[in-house]
Image (cartoon, rainbow, N blue to C red):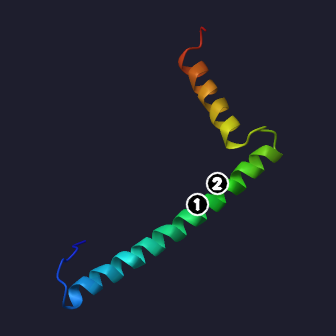
C-alpha cells in the first residue's frame, strides 16, 4: 500500500479508495467476530460457565496448569 502525497492526479484517490474499502472490510469482519464472541459467551453461560468466556478461560488455564504440574 502506497500513500501518495500528490495533490492532483488519480493515484491519491485510487489509493484512498482502496484504503477505505479495506477499512470497511475490516470493520465488517470485526463486527462479525464480535457478534460470534457474544453468541459463544451466551452459549457458555447457558451450559454452566457462570461468566461465559471468562470462566471458560480460567478453567482451561487451571486444567493446563494441573496437567503441567500433576503433583501439586
Residue 70, percent from left and from top? 59, 13
Residue 32 lies left or right of residue 45; in this view the side is: left
Q: In the picture, which quadrant includes the N terminus?
A: bottom left
Picture residue at 28% right of the left edge, 86% below the top: 13
The one of 36 and 3 positioned closer to us in this rendering: 3
Q: In the picture, which quadrant includes the C terminus?
A: top right
Residue 19, percent from left and from top? 35, 75
Asked whether the beta carbons under mark 1 and mark 2 sit within 8 Å of each other, the answer is yes
- Crowd band around label 1 with a 10 angstrom C-alpha radius: few (<14), some (14–19), many (20+): few
Report, in whole angstroms, how far the alpha carbon at label 1 lies from the one at label 2: 6 Å
The one of 7 and 71 positioned closer to us in this rendering: 7
User: For the view shown, which residue lies furthest in the front direction?
Assistant: 7
Picture residue at 47% right of the left edge, 73% below the top: 25
Q: Is residue 32 above or below residue 49?
A: below
SS at badge 2:
helix
Picture residue at 59% right of the left edge, 8% below the top: 71
Q: Dot 1 corresponds to which residue? A: 33
Q: Dot 2 corresponds to which residue? A: 37
Residue 24, percent from left and from top? 47, 74
SS at badge 1:
helix
- Crowd band around label 2 with a 10 angstrom C-alpha radius: few (<14), some (14–19), many (20+): few
Label disc, if present, on residue 16 of the rendered structure: none
Picture residue at 63% right of the left edge, 25% below the top: 62
The one of 72 and 58 positioned closer to us in this rendering: 58
Residue 21 lies left or right of residue 28; in this view the side is: left
Q: How many marks?
A: 2
Amino acid at each position: 500500500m502506497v500513500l501518495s502525497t500528490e495533490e492532483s492526479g488519480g493515484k491519491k484517490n485510487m489509493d484512498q479508495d482502496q484504503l477505505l474499502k479495506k477499512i470497511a472490510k475490516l470493520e465488517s469482519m470485526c463486527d462479525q467476530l464480535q457478534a460470534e464472541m457474544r453468541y459463544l459467551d451466551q452459549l457458555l453461560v447457558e451450559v454452566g460457565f457462570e461468566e461465559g468466556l471468562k470462566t471458560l478461560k480460567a478453567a482451561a488455564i487451571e486444567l493446563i496448569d494441573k496437567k503441567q504440574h500433576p503433583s501439586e
